[in-house]
Amino acid sequence: MMALVLGGASSLTLLNQFLHEEEGDRTHAYRDAGGVWTICKGLTHVDGNPVRKGMVLTPAQCDRLDREQEQKALALIDRIVNVPLTPPQKVGIASFCAWNIGLEKCEHSTFLRELNA
């Protein structure tokens, strides 16, 4: 990760690597630490439906779904954060918002209000 940061990698590349390191890449559904069914790089929904026990995706499907979620998260951060961010800061906030509290909740959160203050 540090080599990517020092090399000036894009936020999308950094987020993809960060999620690979922190969430892993799993093509079979598993329960995360909170007991939520999860797949790929920490996705809890696939095409709008919750991940369910026994769900299996191909690596190509996971790559597509992960990339869509990563792009959506970064686009949201670009839209709702009003302070300058470095790419690593942007990645940290995108990860926190999309993979921990949820994009919709993040948009209306105390966290965001304080960040933008």
Image (cartoon, rainbow, N blue to C red):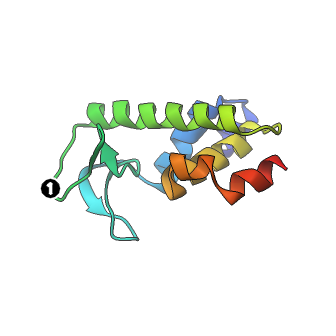
Of residue 1 and residue 107, the one placed in the foreground of this image is 107
In the rendered view of the protein, which quadrant contains the N terminus? top right
Kind of residue sitting beneath label 1: Gly
Instruction: Tell me where residue 2 sits by quadrant.
Output: top right
Neighbourhood count class around disc 1 (C-alpha, 10 Å): few under 14, some 14–19, many 20 upward: few
Left or right of residue 22: residue 32: left
Residue 39 point in image, percent of width and height: 31, 51
Of residue 88 and residue 111, the one placed in the foreground of this image is 111
Total label count? 1
Who's the residue at 65% across and 28% down the image?
10
Left or right of residue 58: residue 79: right
Who's the residue at 65% across and 38% down the image?
77
Of residue 103 and residue 87, the one placed in the foreground of this image is 103
Residue 43 point in image, percent of width and height: 37, 48
Q: Secondary structure at mark 1?
A: loop
Residue 114 point in image, percent of width and height: 79, 55
Left or right of residue 109: residue 115: right
Residue most extreme to the bottom: 34
Name the residue carrying label 1: 54
Instruction: Tell me where residue 84 sits by quadrant.
Output: top right
Vertical position of residue 45 compared to residue 87: above or below: below
Who's the residue at 67% across and 32% down the image?
79
Residue 113 point in image, percent of width and height: 75, 52
